[in-house]
Amino acid sequence: MSTFMAKAETIERRWFIIDAANKPLGKTAVAAANILRGKHRPEFTPHVDCGEFVIIINADKAVLTGNKLQDKYYHHHSGYIGGLKSVQYKTLMATRPEKAMELAVKGMLPHNTLGAKAATRLKVYAGAAHKHEAQKPIEL
């Protein structure tokens, strides 16, 4: 008996919606990353893109446990000397909560072309409203 290998063209992608209100940012990101990757499917194949679409709503109501709001920083570099920019998560969650959630999910995806393709299927919204009702997302 041979091992089953999923094919990307035969995968039927569904839409899932995750409500991040009053849930830890990391736990929500783990759930989203697993669905984006396709690990919840019985036909999961590591080298094939068999993930689904994920909508995360209420990203502004996600919580960070412990002292992470004060102690955690998002760093990025412009490429020039002295070009390191740092933003405290307290500021990031107040101004751009979608960015904080996207960074958390992207960090949990593989750092290759499969992960980049999966990251394009992630839709994050700060509030409860989203524009994907036509896709009939499944509540998680």
Image (cartoon, rainbow, N blue to C red):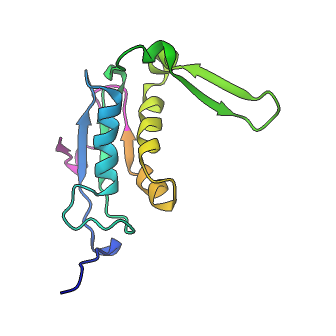
Task: Give 37 or 46, whichever is nearer the viewer.
Answer: 46
* Quarter occupied by residue 98: top left
Q: Position of residue 50 (x, y in %)?
A: 31, 64
* Residue under the image location 44 percent in, 37 percent down: 102
Q: Is residue 125 visible?
A: yes
Q: Could you tell whether 46 is left or right of 68 in the image?
A: left
- Rendered-image quadrant of the C terminus: top left
- The image shows residue 52, relative to residue 91, as above or below, that is below
Q: Position of residue 71 (x, y in %)?
A: 50, 16
- Rendered-image quadrant of the N terminus: bottom left
* Quarter occupied by residue 42: bottom left
- The image shows residue 139, relative to residue 101, as above or below, that is below
In the rendered structure, does residue 49 fall within the stretch colored magenta? Answer: no
* Quarter occupied by residue 75: top right
Tell which residue pokes out farthest to the bottom in this image: 1
Q: Is residue 130 visible?
A: no
Task: Give 1 or 133, whichever is nearer the viewer.
Answer: 1
Task: Give 3 or 133, whichever is nearer the viewer.
Answer: 3
Q: Position of residue 88 (x, y in %)?
A: 54, 18
Q: Which residues are magenta?
A: 124-140
Predominant SS along the magenta part: loop
Q: Could you tell whether 104 is left or right of 84 in the image?
A: left
